[in-house]
């Protein structure tokens, strides 16, 4: 007689990570309007976000706690990009692009 596999309870961590990635997507999408950056800044940031989303999909069941780290990493990449642009390229409210 075949036995039914035991299902482990779902971890909430990957869901939190995907929600965090959705928040970071809005952050990246609003960057040109709010910060005053050029359109070409959003393209590599969007590529980083897509790579993080693909990793989150791949790691959803295999590494559920690691998925939570992905939006933090993407947000830090965004912050470093914006701060570097504000420092060396004059982005921001006062300088404009």
Image: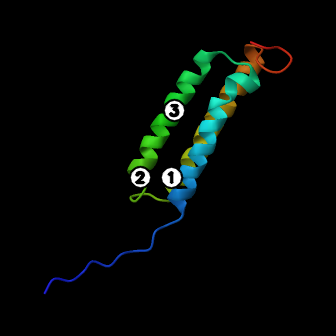
Characterize the local packing of mark 1: few (<14), some (14-19) or many (20 or more) Cα atoms within 10 angstroms. many
Residue carrying label 3: 48
Tell me the distance, in whole angstroms, between the alpha carbons under discs 1 and 3.
15 Å
* Residue behind mark 1: 67
Compared with residue 94, is residue 11 higher up or lower down, i.e. above or below?
below
Q: Residue at x 58, y 38 (%)?
A: 74
Q: Are marks 1 and 2 in contact (CB under 8 Å)?
A: yes
Q: Secondary structure at mark 1?
A: helix
**Residue occupying the far bottom of the picture:** 1
5 to 72, vertically: above or below: below
Q: Is residue 82 left or right of residue 11?
A: right
> SS class of the residue under badge 3?
helix
Residue drawn where x is 42% and y is 49% of the image = 57
Picture disc at residue 59: 2
Q: Is residue 46 left or right of residue 87?
A: left
Q: Secondary structure at mark 2?
A: helix
The residue depicted at 86 percent of the width and 17 percent of the height is: 94
Residue 89, position as x, y percentages in the image: 73, 13
| Image marks 1 and 3: residues in contact by CB distance under 8 Å | no
Q: Earlier in the sequence, mark 2 or mark 3?
A: 3
Say the numbered circle drawn on residue 51.
none
Residue 5: x %, y % from top left: 27, 77
* Looking at the image, residue 72 lies above or below residue 95: below
Q: Position of residue 75 (x, y in %)?
A: 64, 39
In-image side of 33 versus 56 (left or right): right
- From the image, which quarter does the C terminus lie in? top right
């Amino acid at each position: 007689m075949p036995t039914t596999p035991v299902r482990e309870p779902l971890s909430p961590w990957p869901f939190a990570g995907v929600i965090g990635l959705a928040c970071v997507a809005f952050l990246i999408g609003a960057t040109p309007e709010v910060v005053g950056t050029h359109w070409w800044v959003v393209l590599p940031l969007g590529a980083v976000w897509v790579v993080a989303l693909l990793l989150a999909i791949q790691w959803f069941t295999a590494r559920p706690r690691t998925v939570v780290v992905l939006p933090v990493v993407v947000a830090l990449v965004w912050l470093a990009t914006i701060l570097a642009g504000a420092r060396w390229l004059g982005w921001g409210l006062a300088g404009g692009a």
